[in-house]
Image: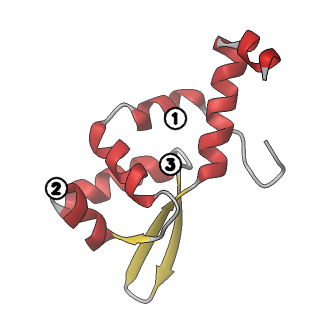
Amino acid sequence: MNESTPPVNPVEFAKALADSTRQKIMELCCCQWCSVTEIVDAVNVSQPTVSHHLAILRRAGLVNVREEGKNTFYSLNQQTVSACCGQLMQVFAPEMIEEM
């Protein structure tokens, strides 16, 4: 983890991943900025539901947020995802790290 990536709570990370809608949102926002409207259309759930899931992803630090006027755009925070996966590997698969 570098200095710009804050420590991540592995429990919050696991909770954020534990929902298929949030997984779809993360996949959609990987490598691109998406508006809430685009996310609603892509995952086929209501805007309040998407906002609820985005709030959970924000709390876990898994999305970057960009405001443009009245629109909010999201992208996957790949640094945080990588850091969380690394933390999990250190605890649950240390032998795999040694092999890398």
- Specify the quadrant of the image occupied by residue 90: top right
Q: Which mark is residue 54?
A: none
Residue marked by disc 2: 45
Q: Is residue 49 left or right of residue 52?
A: left
**Callout 1 amino acid:** Phe
Rendered residue at 44%/73% (across/down):
73
Give residue 49's quadrant in the image: bottom left
Q: Please tell me whether residue 57 is drawn above or below residue 17 in the rendered image.
A: below
Mark 2 or 3: in front is 2
Identify the residue position indicated by label 3 in the image. Answer: 59
Badge 1 or badge 3: first in the primary sequence: 1
Residue at the farthest bottom position: 69
Q: Quadrant of the N terminus?
A: top right
- List x then y, in percent, for residue 70: 37, 86
Q: Residue furthest front?
A: 99
Determine whether 32 is above or below 86 in the image: below
Q: Nearer the viewer, mark 1 or mark 3?
A: 1
Q: Secondary structure at mark 3?
A: helix
Along the line of sight, which residue is nearer the eye, 94 or 22?
94
First in residue order: circle 2 vs circle 3: 2
